[in-house]
Image (cartoon, rainbow, N blue to C red):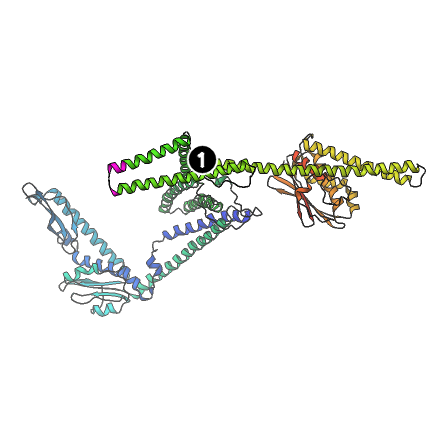
């Protein structure tokens, strides 16, 4: 399975910048989230509420205020509570029976509030022991709970500023509304609620939010014939709404601080994902991996999940303790640690996954795949080895026996149409398999016959199984024979050309030597042209010596009989030294040499052989470069190598393959009008190979480029 993602090549500083900025942005969001959670006023209702119609205030305070007034009215006072005026005994709904006789064994009682049906459950209290110490303790506990409730309700009604209330059942009343006309007073306030028995509830609330407000608290008003009036003044409402508006603005600001860094984190992660596995200036389409990408993806994900889970649990516990003691310094430290130690491993796994997706091998780089693959490979290997132990005849006999036994058993045990159909199906599948096997065997036989008659250009189209392996072996053998034949033909052609070239290049100066020697002999040394003849004899002798020396060096290079003394040297210094030695030729050539050299390029090579290589290359430059053109000499790093490029424009058309120029006695000047031997490039290649380097030529139109690669020291 492969997932192809188009890559965007990002420079390394961009990736480093993203990896540094992402934890900082995560820290900002995390710290803002913790700050938001510490706000007591935070709620979605508060964030989304519109306070203009006071509905939010109504929902927050009117139901609670009504409950306080309702409980205060029926609790009355402390004396009434202590005299059990608000408690009564009720038979519990739970009974204990003797199931053998279905007779009631124990009848239980419980304490219940007289006004709101609140149960104060006691331990089982049989009716015959209602005055036990256990029951007395239950009564005391219930009274204490009602007293605590009474004090709480009283304090809330007295301490809530701007709250006015009134409650009456027609006989008794409580409240703090200063006006005799209670209804008019409530209607004049900003927020109010009027609940009277037999009438529809009147209230200032205009909205309809059934999830916030319910009539549950007022269900007892009608049962007890109780009227309750609740109102809040404009000042109280304005004060609280102002605080809510400020809290709302603070929540909005913190949400922006949370969401904006989160969006930037998403953008930076996308940038990292697009640039993952790509290298600026690297090979197009190639995915580069580093050491941290080696672990299996699924095991890395499991370890990452456990690590992140433990880290989150630890951080949450520590942050909760720090928040309990309001230690902002420790909250900052914990948020910073969590953002770094949580984000970096997560990014590592995500980027490794993206790299594997780009390379199309993320499934193969999992432990599950390796386990399944090795298990099936082992089983297949053992099965094949066991099956291959039998001859072809025994296999066919075995298959036939199995099919026959299956058919016989099916017909004997179940003599029905289903058994016959099953037997026919088994037979058909077996026959089909044998026919396919026979077809493959026939193709292998025909391919082997063709190869035996010398036809090697028809590969056998059989795959899978043992016959596929045999076919692959025959195809490989025929390919090897084809390659050997082509290599032999090429070698014969090279031998012919080599003999022809050697004969031509050596015979030419020898012919000149014989000719001018005869002229000197016939005309004598006193002839006017004798000095000219002598000069030509000297030139041709030097030419013959050069050819002989080049042949000797080419022979040594081809046989590997070269003394190599490897050492650490600077390629840049060597280039400058060679050009300095050849300065007169450089000046006299009229060529414009352009150098692009780094400060240094330490390589491991033989300085003497490298000098000869550069001398041969520059000699070709002087001989074959177009007059007045530029020559480029560049040294640059290339992975594990340093590369030296020498580029020039050829004077003659280069209608030849670069590989042919490396053959002995081969020249770009097909007319062979120059004084070169055609051995220089071949010798240079042999010298580079003997140093463990590389030598390459390339031709683009008239542009000729020679490149040598040397390993870095």
Judge whether residue 414 is colored magenta: yes
In the rendered image, residue 556, in percent from the top left (x then y), is placed at 70, 31
Q: Residue at x 24, y 39 (%)?
A: 415
User: What segment is highlighted magenta in the picture?
Assistant: 409-417
Which residue in the protein does label 1 denote?
466
| Closest to the observer, 666 or 230 | 666
In the rendered image, residue 457, in percent from the top left (x then y), is placed at 55, 41
Label 1 packing within 10 angstroms: few (<14), some (14-19), many (20+): few
Relative to 385, is 660 above or below? below
Give the residue at the far right of this rendering. Answer: 526
**Residue 598 can be seen, yes or no:** no
Relative to 299, is 559 above or below? above
> Is residue 252 left or right of 165 when viewed as pictured?
right
Q: Quadrant of the N terminus?
A: top left
Q: How many marks can you see?
A: 1
Q: Residue at x 68, y 50 (%)?
A: 701
Q: Most prominent secondary structure in the magenta stretch?
A: helix
> Is residue 67 left or right of 266 when viewed as pictured?
left
In the rendered image, residue 317, in percent from the top left (x then y), is placed at 36, 43
């Amino acid at each position: 399975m492969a997932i192809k993602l188009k890559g965007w090549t990002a420079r390394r500083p961009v990736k480093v910048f993203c990896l540094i900025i992402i934890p900082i942005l995560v820290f900002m969001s995390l710290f803002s989230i913790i700050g938001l959670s510490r706000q007591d006023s935070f709620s979605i209702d508060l964030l989304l509420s519109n306070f203009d119609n006071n509905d939010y205030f109504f929902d927050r305070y009117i139901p609670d205020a009504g409950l306080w007034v309702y409980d205060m009215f029926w609790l009355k006072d402390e004396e009434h509570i202590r005299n059990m005026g608000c408690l009564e005994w009720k038979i519990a709904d739970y009974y204990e029976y003797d199931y053998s006789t279905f007779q009631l064994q124990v009848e239980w009682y419980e304490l219940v509030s007289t006004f709101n049906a609140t149960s104060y459950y006691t331990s089982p209290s049989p009716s015959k022991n209602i005055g036990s110490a256990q029951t007395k303790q239950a009564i005391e506990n219930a009274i204490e709970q009602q007293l605590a409730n009474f004090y709480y309700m009283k304090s809330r009604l007295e301490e809530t500023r701007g709250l006015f209330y009134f409650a009456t059942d027609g006989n008794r009343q409580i409240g703090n509304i200063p006006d005799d006309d209670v209804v008019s007073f409530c209607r004049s306030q900003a927020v109010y609620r009027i609940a009277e028995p037999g009438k529809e509830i009147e209230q200032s609330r205009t909205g309809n939010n059934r999830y916030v407000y319910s009539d549950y608290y007022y269900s007892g008003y009608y049962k007890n014939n109780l009227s309750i009036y609740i109102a809040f003044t404009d000042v109280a409402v304005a004060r609280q709404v102002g605080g809510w508006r400020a809290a709302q603005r603070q929540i909005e600001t913190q949400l922006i601080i949370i969401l904006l860094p989160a969006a930037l984190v998403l953008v930076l992660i996308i940038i990292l994902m697009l640039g993952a596995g790509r290298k600026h200036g690297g090979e197009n389409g190639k995915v580069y991996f580093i050491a941290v990408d080696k672990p299996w993806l699924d095991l890395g994900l499991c370890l990452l999940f456990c690590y992140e889970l433990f880290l989150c649990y630890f951080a949450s516990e520590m942050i909760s303790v720090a928040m309990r003691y309001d230690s902002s310094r420790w909250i900052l430290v914990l948020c910073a640690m969590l953002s770094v130690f949580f984000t970096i491993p997560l990014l590592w796994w995500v980027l490794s996954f993206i790299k594997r997706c780009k390379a199309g091998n993320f499934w193969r780089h999992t432990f599950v795949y390796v386990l399944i693959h090795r298990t099936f490979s082992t089983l297949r290997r053992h099965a094949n080895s066991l099956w291959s132990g039998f001859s072809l005849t025994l296999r066919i006999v075995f298959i036939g026996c199995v099919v026959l036994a299956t058919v016989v058993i099916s017909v004997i045990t179940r003599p029905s149409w289903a058994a016959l159909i099953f037997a026919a199906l088994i037979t058909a599948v077996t026959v089909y398999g044998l026919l396919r096997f026979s077809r493959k065997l026939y193709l292998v036989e025909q391919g082997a016959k063709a190869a035996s008659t010398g036809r090697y250009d028809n590969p056998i189209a059989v795959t899978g199984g043992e016959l596929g392996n045999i076919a692959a072996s025959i195809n490989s053998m025929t390919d090897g024979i084809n390659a050997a034949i082509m290599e032999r033909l090429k070698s014969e052609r090279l031998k012919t050309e080599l003999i022809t070239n050697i004969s031509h290049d050596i015979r030419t100066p020898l012919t000149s030597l014989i000719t001018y020697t005869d002229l000197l002999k016939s005309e004598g040394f006193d002839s006017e042209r004798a000095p000219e003849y002598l000069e030509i004899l000297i030139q041709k002798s030097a030419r013959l010596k050069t050819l002989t020396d080049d042949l000797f060096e080419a022979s040594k290079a081809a046989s590997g009989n070269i003394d190599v003394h490897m050492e650490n040297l600077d390629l840049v210094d060597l280039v400058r030294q060679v050009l300095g030695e050849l300065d007169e030729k450089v000046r006299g050539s009229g060529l414009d040499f352009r150098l692009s050299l780094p400060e240094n390029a330490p390589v491991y090579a033989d300085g003497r052989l490298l000098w000869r290589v550069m001398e041969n290359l520059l000699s070709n430059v002087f001989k074959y470069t177009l007059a007045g053109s530029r020559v480029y000499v560049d040294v640059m790093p290339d992975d594990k190598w340093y590369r030296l490029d020498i580029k020039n424009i050829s004077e003659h058309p280069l209608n030849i393959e670069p590989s042919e120029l490396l053959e002995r006695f081969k020249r770009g000047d097909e007319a062979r009008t120059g004084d070169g031997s055609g051995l220089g490039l071949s010798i240079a290649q042999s010298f580079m190979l003997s140093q463990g380097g590389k030598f390459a030529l390339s031709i683009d139109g008239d542009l000729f480029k020679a490149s040598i690669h040397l390993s870095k020291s």
